[in-house]
Amino acid sequence: MDAQSFETFEAEAMAAGFDEVIERTWESGLALDMHSHQFDVESVVVRGEMWLTCDGNTRHLMPGQGFALAADEPHSERYGPQGATTWIARRHVAGAGR
């Protein structure tokens, strides 16, 4: 995806009330055990692949596919053999993580 596409993702996320937008690259085969964040997340995979598990359900996400998580929502992540790049919008929530 090109820089303009990230700029569009960022602008739409900020307009929707998110306060931080980043691009993150994940290493090959990385697995993150069950955890949660103190912010809402909307994310899209732009390179590679990942598996996201929430409430016992696993989704296999490829480029162009995205997901949303509420603050404090437990989940685990696993990234494919080529790693992955994701665009992530975060909305920090007062009182989350308590």
Image (cartoon, rainbow, N blue to C red):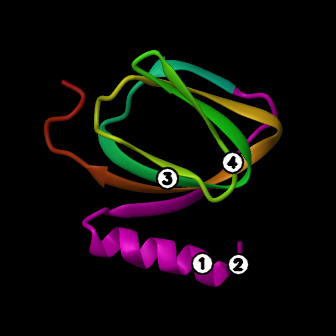
Question: Disc number at residue 43?
Answer: 3
Three-letter amino acid code at the position of disc 1: Ser
Question: Disc number at residue 5?
Answer: 1
In the rendered view of the protein, which quadrant contains the N terminus? bottom right
Three-letter amino acid code at the position of disc 3: Ser
Distance from disc 2 to disc 1, alpha carbons, whole Å, reads 5 Å
The verdict on residue 53 being magenta is no
Taking the view exactly as shown, the residue that stands out farthest to the left is: 95
Distance from disc 2 to disc 4, alpha carbons, whole Å, reads 17 Å
In the rendered view of the protein, which quadrant contains the C terminus? top left
Distance from disc 3 to disc 1, alpha carbons, whole Å, reads 13 Å
> Which residue is disc 2 drawn over?
2
The residue closer to the viewer here, 67 or 23, is 67
Part of the protein shown in magenta: 1-30
Distance from disc 2 to disc 3, alpha carbons, whole Å, reads 16 Å
Distance from disc 4 to disc 3, alpha carbons, whole Å, reads 12 Å
Question: Disc number at residue 94?
Answer: none
Secondary-structure class at tag 2: loop
Which residue: 46% across, 72% down?
10
